[in-house]
Amino acid sequence: MSNNYQLGFSTLEQEISLERLPTQGQIPLCLRGSLFRNGPAKFEVGKEKYRHWFDGLAMLHKFTFNEGQVSYINRFLQSETYCKTLKTGKICVAEFATTPSRPFWQNISSMLSSDLSDNANINITQIADRFFAITATPYPVEFDPNTLKTLGKFDYKDNLPCSMTTGHPYNDFARQELVNFTTHFSRISTYNFYRIPFGQMKRSLIASIPVNEPAYIHSFALTENYIILPESPLLTNPLELISEQLRGKPFIDSLSWQPERGAKFLVLRREDGEFVRSYETDAFFALNQINAFENKDEIILDIVAYNRSILDEYYLDFLKGSGRFKLSNSELRRYSISLNKSRLECEVISDQIIEFPRINPLYYQSPNYRFVYAISRRQDRPYDFFNQLIKIDILRQTTKIWFEENCYPSEPVFVATPKAQGEDEGVIFSIVLDVKKGNSFLLILDSCSFSEIGRAEIPHHIPFGTHGQYFAVD
């Protein structure tokens, strides 16, 4: 059986700038701003191929809305990794699951020089008035938000230890600060939490927690008063990591799934960084958090969780193969942490198979939030990729679906309408790959009814991306 979706994992070489995309339906006149998307778009260099979806060279996309019209521009992120790779015509910088073919002594040299990739293909963030493409390695790459021209790798120039970070910083608009964390591999490794006040570029350390075997952590949770780090048993032994690097092995090979050790939630206070305690639970793996909030003496976390690590399911040989390859099913789980009784409980609040969840950003940390938007898979197509969009009402336990045959949507991005009164008053953006036509389109849904409002056609396909953000024009 041929996988219809494999076009989404094929390279896009074309870079274009179009002042006006052809549209169908209605583009809401209230939309004034730009949707930025990030993700891998080049999966081979010369005769060499990247091994994993997370490894492909980053491309930025921008859709700008003005008076019912949509313009579009896309450009490769010309990171140092991209430029060096294109110049040499081969893969020459190690990525998450791909390493260059080179002599042993070059592996030593690369390790000693901390030659980490700046191929920032996960997300986009704004710090002060500057725009950055970000990934799990420590180097954000700045770009011009008007032209998407790459402006260069950014260095915070502080002493915050960092071997890895997340592509999911939190913007807390109530406290007017960005919060994120880093993992540092060493003889005594650490998780390091920091904040950046809005309008500034300087990181300030909140807390540093020692850890013997750091976990692979893609995202974390934040409430009004607490930072919560979900630590799955996908672990790295720093000494084994060094050994793997010397042998030319990629980072993914240093990760060990150890379900017998269970999972943990590390909780610390935002105000002073004091460690509260660690809460243990059964083993699970998660890439993306949904929301977290406080309810009296409890912390509630909603997470897209799996019973095992799914990173091996995103190898390109599997995704682009002709066999019947089945992705693991996820669950929308709610973890309740009792601060007074030191107890943790878990319940499944939706059995829908979802990933890349988003909510109305104004409802982060709110106990009153109800709606989760995500990509999803039809249960009657177990061997397919994510092939529909879903809206889940976690209060009423109902769902709404957008589905179109031969179409594969990307992460939904919620944008509230001006002066919205309800949580779900707004629109949903999603880039959808139409494998029958061989191109992509930007889909716009009414986020309340989940029905289509309009779409804008793109003249080429856009490979499956990761994350994106919408920035309104004041």
Image (cartoon, helix red, strand yellow):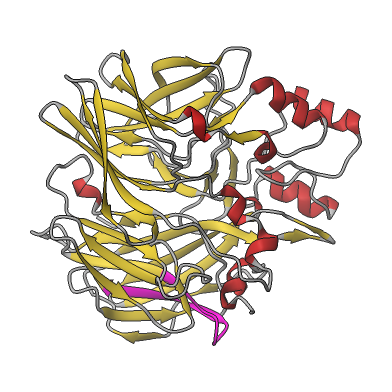
* Farthest front residue in view: 260
Quadrant housing residue 394: bottom left
Q: Residue at x 46, y 63 (%)?
A: 62
Q: Quadrant of the C terminus?
A: bottom left
Task: Work out whether 341 lies above or below 405.
Answer: above
Q: Residue at x 59, y 55 (%)?
A: 313
Task: Work out whether 189 lies above or below 51.
Answer: above
Quadrant housing residue 63: bottom left
Q: Position of residue 240 (x, y in %)?
A: 71, 25
Q: Residue at x 35, y 61 (%)?
A: 374
* Farthest left residue in view: 421
Q: Residue at x 54, y 43 (%)?
A: 135
Quadrant housing residue 352: bottom left
Is 338 on the left or on the right of 126, as rendered? left
Task: Work out whether 131 lies above or below 352.
Answer: above
Magenta stretch: residue 214 in it? no
Q: Position of residue 130 (x, y in %)?
A: 43, 42
Figure disc tally: 0
Q: Quadrant of the N terminus?
A: bottom right
Is 405 on the left or on the right of 396, as rendered? right
The magenta stretch spans which residues? 431-445
Depth check, front residue: 431 or 1: 1
How would you classify the magenta stretch by its main secondary structure? Answer: strand
Task: Work out whether 97 lies above or below 15.
Answer: above
Q: Is residue 308 visible?
A: yes
Q: Is residue 53 visible?
A: no
Q: Position of residue 276 (x, y in %)?
A: 29, 16
Q: Position of residue 326 (x, y in %)?
A: 55, 64
